Amino acid sequence: MIQADHLHLAINHSPLYAETFAFFLLLIGTIRRNRTLVTTGLVVAVVAGLCGAAAYWTGDEAADVIQKANIPGVDTQAIGLHELAAKFGLAATAITGAAAFAALWWRRRWLEIVIVILSLWSVSVIVRVALLGGRIHHPEVRDVIRG
């Protein structure tokens, strides 16, 4: 049986990778004025928003499992800060995904440029969420950028 912590660990990298791919597809597509790349980037940004929601929704149960399990080497104090950052991550990917979804039907170059910027913002937020989440299980990143 898959527990919530296993499910969360299985999908928690997907928002970071999906949003990063969306950013580069949108950036290259916008610079080259390539509709296929821009459309692909918009679709991937929508998927990244869904991945962000899935990672966020599995996080609470994963936190409960980890806090009750008393696993050696796990920093349960890091869960709270990761959870707070995850709320911002959910908002960032949702805003970017919703804007990308709208841009799939309402094609305007200025909107595509705005979504490139939103996507970069989402990547930066998700990178912080990932770093804070990594501190829970990985002691090698606990001293990196205390926050």
Image: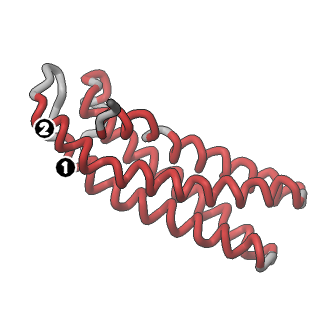
Please report the residue visible at 47 percent of the width from the left and 62 percent of the height from the top: 92
How far from the left and from the top, in percent, is residue 24?
A: 71, 48
Q: What colouring style does the render use?
A: secondary structure
Mark 1: secondary structure: helix
- Mark 1 is on which residue type? Gly
Lower position in the chain sequence, tag 1 or tag 2: 2
Using the image, determine if residue 80 lies above or below residue 130. below
Tag on residue 67? 2
Which of the two discs, 1 and 2, sits closer to the camera?
A: 2
Please report the residue visible at 30 percent of the width from the left and 22 percent of the height from the top: 140
How far from the left and from the top, in percent, is residue 99?
A: 62, 72
Q: Which residue is more in the foreground, 81 or 1?
A: 1
Tag on residue 117? none
Please report the residue visible at 77 percent of the width from the left and 76 percent of the height from the top: 105
How far from the left and from the top, in percent, is residue 123?
A: 53, 51
Mark 2: secondary structure: helix
Please report the residue visible at 90 percent of the width from the left and 57 percent of the height from the top: 34
**Could you tell me how far apart the alpha carbons at marks 1 and 2 are, in whole angstroms?**
11 Å
Q: Are marks 1 and 2 in contact (CB under 8 Å)?
A: no
Which class describes the residues within 10 Å of circle 1: few (<14), some (14-19), or many (20+)? some
Drawn side of residue 118 relative to residue 24, left or right: left
Circle 1 residue: 80
Q: Which residue is more in the foreground, 4 or 13?
A: 4
- Mark 2 is on which residue type? Gln
Image quadrant holding the N terminus, namely: top left
Residue with the most extreme front position: 1
Q: Which residue is more in the foreground, 69 or 95?
A: 69
Using the image, determine if residue 118 lies above or below residue 142. below
Using the image, determine if residue 74 lies above or below residue 27. above
**Toward which corner of the image does residue 62 lie, by quadrant?**
top left
